[in-house]
Structures are given as structure tokens and as C-alpha cells.
Image: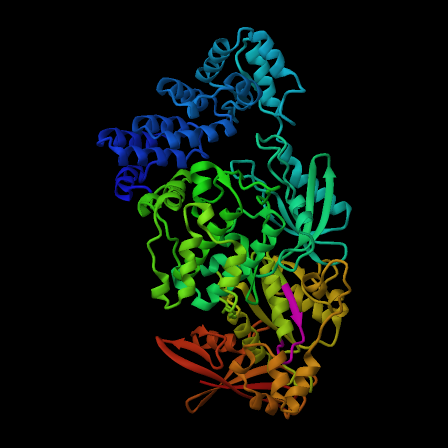
Amino acid sequence: MLDRRTAEQILHCAVGLSGSAMWEAIDKKIDSMLLNENTLQTATLIHLACFSSDGRHLMRAIEYCEKSENWVMLANILQIARKYGEVKAVLAIHKIGVKHDLPELIVEDLPNWFQTHGIYWFDLYEDRQAGICFITSGDYLHILNLINDLYENPEAFWQNVLDPKNCPPQYPEERYQLLKALASDQEPITETPANKRSFVDVDFRAFATKNNIQIPRQLQEGIEDLRRCSSVFLGVDTDGIVKIWKEALTHEQSRFNSELDSETSIFEEIGDSPHFPKYYGTDELAPGVMFLRREFIFGQSLNDYTRPETVLAKDEAISIIRQLAEQLHHLHEHDIAYLDLRPDNVLLKDSQAHLSDFNTSRKMNGRDTVTAFILDPRFAAPEVVLECKAGKQTDIFQLGLLFHQLLTGRLPFVMAPELTSGKRTREHEVLKFALGNATLPYRYNLTDEFDDKSLKIISRMLAKTPSDRPTAKEIVEHLTTRKADVQQHRRAADVKPERNTVLFPARMGIPHKGHIEYISRIIDLGYHVRISLQRSYTITDRDPIPKWQVMKMVARSLLDLGFAPSSFSFILTPFFETDEEHQMHFAMLPGREHIVAVASSNPAVRNLFPNHPFLEQKAVFGTEGKLYCDRSWGEILRTAVKQNDRKTFEKYTASGVEHVLPLKELQVTYAETPVEFVEGRVRILLQKSAEQIPIRLGRYQTPEEAIATYLGAKILDPYSKFTVLQIGGIKQLLRYKKATLTSTGDKILHFEL
């Protein structure tokens, strides 16, 4: 284990610094300290943890290992260096082994290893501005000197290395050209090859156009970096269903090509499972450019449940962990390790947790471990940080971290918290989180804190040695009796309406769960939803509830699901006699330029918006290859209200309905005198104390908005049963009383303050 006090004393020097300045400060601090066993061990681990960010850290780790005579750690580093082709590190350890007569550190096959592996993975640098790739002069002189020392016939060596049959599969062309330059004793510089992935987005959009696939948005841009990311698109397929198209990354030019797996092969291996997104196959856009097509998982990111202010109840957290353990068990039964379990990759919908990304998952093929590197420092397991290895038990460690975080809102192993208070780089995060994960003991007693002995398993899940951790199956069995409905939490990010609005026109009487689910799924797609409540000033047997009260019901239901108020908005749309009037209403709608699609399955609505793409019910509820029939529960709800059938009413009604009008009050609305069409104007009459104030209603205003504008008031809570206004610093309640029809056909809306 790491001596935390020594480590934080050293790492304090890194605060506010980055790059070479940071490491100069750290090493200077180490050199100034008493170089005892604790200091040298700490220095070794600090550099080893950052190896995956920069291979040069391996040399400093070797230096500190030799000083402390930590030969076991040095043997581990040798295995890492051999795997990653770190020539300098392998040679340095070999020399230490010879010097101290340590067989485990002597590389008996050094000439063969260098010729078949080490020479191919030299440190390559790129100057993007100049458009060149190169090897530094110090590195290439080191390579040439090593060749002259190891081989009697350098020409034969180069001939062997450059033989295409001996090169690693799909060896990068720029590296091959640099090798040729070295073999010819020329300066190792070559042009940067064209970025093939720069055309991926263009290729996909052309493919979508050709195949009549609508592309509402790009969800992720591809990144070619230490953590490679796919280009990801949200599309509406030709069958009308929303799906994900994700670039299927290939690994031909990686030194671990033979070990890495494509996401498509993972989906094909696990098959059709209720645990995971449905996989619909692949689309080849061009040679070497492949996109997998899969189901879009609707839901809320588990990130929204990991902050201290949004922690879950104990049983809710246990329920989620058990579900994830069950999914991991399913993967492990198929000999697959997930390897990237973190809140970002888990979606929660109706209390069900779903793993959503398999880009870094690996087929184990009977092995205990595979080569790995740090993906997210916050969720890096000890064996990944210190040995560059991962396996099925790595998933268990990550699940343990998530378990602790869901219960407490914090991660359990944090080193020098101030590290990321200033500049935040990957190396800062590695030192703050990954180093702690790998070396700090678990000192929490959640069993006593939550008075639940089942939580004792967390400390086992977070064991530093993989074999000491329970299996996914053991966790499922241990938590099998725990089931809980997870309450929705407020989502972390609001959805902005600018050029990102979906219009949702609906003749909505009593809002049912289907309405709310339809709207919520559109928000989950990343849109702001503008809800148009039609026939706003009529009273019919089908729609007797005033639309500003329906608005409150819908809003309360969406807020119950955790959506922020800025994720949706409303307009009240009057009943028009002609389609032309109806079209004019929407053509003049404020913010119309931001509407990118319309959500409706009504053919009459499609006629009103001939130039907009549509998101029909099937788009968000349908499954590829299965027949979908549009759903409507309006008549069921109306009958339930009229017959006082509470059981049916509660089964179908949206959660926010009775917040505004209880069942008994809803029944009263069905006794209202029908008003099929308002011949004249709609006006407001506000009762304020003994005064009756007539107020003009703007075309796109709700009655409450018109009243607030007239009074110079601020609406504090537009979605409570009685709208809360603030007038001159005083809160007042605005209450709708009734509507009357005049002899001239005008409709008067009566409110009181």
C-alpha cells in the first residue's frame, strides 16, 4: 500500500502546474526528501500510474525501483514494457538484471524480442502544423546504437524487419516509412498520412441521404486520441424508428491489434438479450468505414445520481447494483469483460438500469487477463493502473466504486483532492483518482452507517487483488432480495430550445401516461419540446378541462420524471375552422425558426407541416422487425372518470393530474356546458379584492401570462394548482374560477387574485 502522507506531500507540488513543469516539481520534491523505502515506493507508483499517458514515466519508475531494490515491482514493470514495446525500459531492466544477477530481470530473448516487437513501436511524434511525423534525434541514435550492439549483421536485421511478412498486421504506413529511413541512415521524418476518419462524418451523411435516413443530430464526434471515440449519429430509419448509428472502430493500426475486439463482434457474441441494447447489424459505407446500427436506449444517465445532493436511498442503490451485477454475470458467462463500468455508461429508465456502450469490452477467450490501459481515471482498477492488465474481476472493482458512489455521492479513494482545483489534465486525474484506487485501503464502514450487513460486500468488491473480489453471480445472489423503485432525480443538464425544438401538437383531455412517456422520450433524444395544447378555449365532452390546467398536469408529470422546466414549454392553440388559419397560427409562432421536427402520428397534423420531419409514436416506441400500433388511452380515461373507476384511472392517468384536479373535481368538469366553437374573442376578467379588471389575452399567451404582464408581476410557479405570482415583493395566488359565454359569442375567463 501507498504511504498516503508521503504521496500527498509530493503531489502537493503538482497543484496548478501541468506538463513538464509539473513533473519537474514532483521529481525535485522527491529528490529533496529522505529517500527511504516509503518515498521510493511512492515515487515508483506515482510514475507507474501515469505510464499510459506517457511512456517516459516508465524510466523514472525503473530508476526509483532500483534505488529501493524492489525487484518484484521491477519484474512487473518488465512485463508491461515488453508488451508495450518500450525498448528503453526493457533494456534498462535487462542491464539491472545482469548487474545484480537477477534472472527474473534478464531478458534472455532480447535480440529476438527487439527484432519482432520492440523495433516496431518506437516513440513517434507529430507536428501537425508542419504536417510531419518524426523520431527524435536522441531516440533514433539510441535505436541505431542498440542495433549495432545486438546484431553482427545490421543489414540482415533491417531486411528482416522491413519484410512485409514480418511486420505486424496493418502496420501504420508512417511508421513503416520511418523504419525505412532509419535503415537507409536517413533523418527519420515523413509526411503525416491523411486522416481517414476525417471523412467518416461526410461518408455517413451521404449514406443517410442515399438511403432516406433522417439524421436529427450527431451525438458524438470521432476522436483519434489515447481514448479513441466513435462518431455517433441519431437517425430515423426507413422503418420510421429512431436508432443509433455508431462508427465501428477497427484496431488494425494498434500494437494490440490481435487482442482488441470490435463492438460489433461483442454484440454478435452476446446475442439478443433483454439486458442490453438490441443490435440490428452493420452498414458498410466505404472500404474500412463501418457503422453498427442499434436500438436507442431512452433514460436518464446515472451521472445524475452520483452527486452528494442526489444520492439514492439505500435500497434504490442496491437495486441498481444488483441489476448491473446481473448484466455483468451475463457478459462473464459469455466470457466477455465489460471494462468500462462508470455512471456515464449506465442509463436508468423506469427503475431499470442498462449498460449502454460496449466499445471497450473484450472477449477473454479463456484468459484471466488482457492488456489494458486507463480509460477513465476515476474508475480505474488497481491491476489496470499498476500492471496494465484487466479481466472480469476488473468489472467487479468498478461496480464496487459505483456502489459506494451511489450511496455516498463520493468516490472512496481520492488522493490529494486539491490536485484538480486548478488546471485539470488527464495526469492530474490519474494521480487524484487512479493512484488512490490502486493503492489506498478502503476505510469506510457503510455497514454500520446504513445499518445493513449486506453492504459489507463493498469492501470485498474493492479488494486490491482481483482474486479476492466476489464474482458477479455472488453479488446477484447476495443482493437478490433487494428490489426498489428508483425515484427520478433532477437531470444535470437542461435542454436548450435554440434550433433544437420539437413541436408536440396534441388534443389532450386528461393527460395519460402515454402522453408523458412520448414527450419524455423526445426530451431524452436531446430536444426541447414545445407542447401545443389544441382547442384551448372550447369545452367538449372529450376535452372539458381548460387547457391551462392541462398544461399544469403535463408539466407536473414531467417534473416528476426529473426533467428541468427549461426542457419543455407550452402554447395554447385555439380551435380554427380552416387548415389555413391553423397553418398561419404556427407560421407566426414565436421561436418557429427553432422547430426542427414535429412529434405526432395524426395524419391531419402532417398536412399542417409538409416540410418538417416527423417523430411518430413508432419512432420512439417501435422495435425493428415488429409491428407497432399507435396507442391511445383517452377513451379509457374518460370512461374511468365518468364511472368513478379509480383503479383504472390510476393505472392510466399521468402522475401530475391530481396535483391540479382530483378525481372528484375532474368529474365536475364533464358536467360543463359544451362550447364547440368560440364565435367572438377570448377575454379575461380578474377579480382583485372588490375590483373586476378586464385584461386582453395575447395570441400566444396563457391566461396566467397575460395577467402577470398586466400586473407587472413575476410568475414564480406556473405549474402549481394555483399559479404563484410575485407582485412588489409579495407572493399571491392566482386562481381560475370559471368560464362564461356572452350573448355576442365572446368567452370570458374568470380568475381571482
Q: Which quadrant does the C terminus fall into?
A: bottom left
Q: Main secondary structure of the magenta part?
A: loop
**724 displayed left or right of 191:** left
Q: Quadrant of residue 224?
A: top right
Residue 336 percent coordinates (x, y) = 60, 47
Which is nearer the eye, 580 or 77?
77
Q: Is residue 694 visible?
A: yes
Which is nearer the eye, 15 or 79?
79
| Residue 507 falls inside the magenta stretch | yes
Q: Is residue 187 above or below residue 74?
A: above
Q: Is residue 497 visible?
A: no
Residue 59 percent coordinates (x, y) = 39, 26
**48 displayed left or right of 634:** left
Question: How does the figure colour the protein chain or chains?
Answer: rainbow
Q: Is residue 170 above or below residue 276?
A: above
Residue 746 percent coordinates (x, y) = 63, 86
Q: Which residues are magenta?
A: 503-512
Residue 400 percent coordinates (x, y) = 45, 54
Which is nearer the eye, 621 or 534?
621
Q: Quadrant of residue 31?
A: top left
